[in-house]
Amino acid sequence: MAGSGPPFDLSVTHEGLDALVRAIRQEADGKALRKDLAKSMRDALRPGAATAKSSIMGMASSGTGTGPGLRAGIAKKIRPEVKLGGRWTGARVKAFKTPGLRHFPNAPKRTNRRDGGWRTLTYGREPWRTQTGKRQWFDDAFANDTDIHIAAVQEAMEAMARRLAARAR
């Protein structure tokens, strides 16, 4: 090997991640290496997930209901997701649907909306009313730190590439 870099092109794109996953598959213990890469990429995104969770917990609440907490229910469903192969390859922080939360599966999406909010019954009966959430709570959580999260994921990918390059020597 001429240089000290990995034997494949690495960049924080789908192609770079696909190249890294292909190189991992060629190794004898590729499954363990993929698990390590996925874990390190998820760990790199955990601070962003924590920021999004604290952002939704900062949403105003009237707090008069006896049902499960809307903000806490949404915060529990925010987590980093990494997939290495298949139809979608990449790393992201996702707010998953909340099906058991007051029959409101789209709570993360509806509370993040810029316009309108969502309609709900008052104590389960008429009249309908419109509630608004903390607009852009999820998007704003990542607005200033996008470069930091991309760099952390790239560092996790580069660490795995260095690990593979060291094996090839």
Image: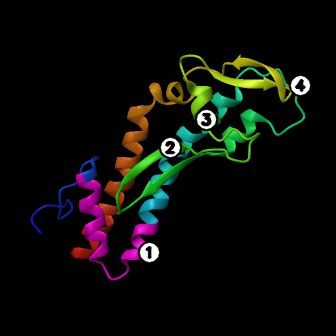
The amino acid marked with disc number 3 is: Pro
Residue 132 spot, x, y in % from top left: 66, 19
Q: Which residue does the numbered mark 1 point to in the structure image? A: 32
Q: Is residue 152 above or below residue 22?
A: above
* Residue beneath the point at 34% across and 48% down: 154
Q: Which residue does the numbered mark 4 point to in the structure image? A: 64
What is the spatial separation of the Cα atoms under label 1 and label 2, in whole angstroms?
A: 23 Å
Q: Is there a contact, CB below 8 Å, between mark 1 and mark 4?
A: no
What SS does tag 1 mark?
A: helix
Density class for disc 4 (Cα within 10 Å; few <14, some 14-19, many ≥20) is few
What is the spatial separation of the Cα atoms under label 1 and label 4, in whole angstroms?
A: 49 Å
Q: Is residue 59 at least partly visible in the picture?
A: yes
Q: Tell me which colouring the rendered structure shows.
A: rainbow
What SS does tag 2 mark?
A: strand
* Residue beneath the point at 41% across and 33% down: 146
User: Is 165 included in the stretch rendered in magenta?
Assistant: no
Density class for disc 1 (Cα within 10 Å; few <14, some 14-19, many ≥20) is few
The amino acid marked with disc number 1 is: Ala
Q: Which residue does the numbered mark 2 point to in the structure image? A: 93
Density class for disc 2 (Cα within 10 Å; few <14, some 14-19, many ≥20) is many
Q: Is there a contact, CB below 8 Å, between mark 1 and mark 2?
A: no
Which residues make up the magenta segment? 15-35
- Magenta: main secondary structure: helix
Residue 144 spot, x, y in % from top left: 45, 25
The circle drawn on residue 108 is 3
Question: Which tag is nearer the camera, tag 2 or tag 3?
Answer: 3
The amino acid marked with disc number 2 is: Val
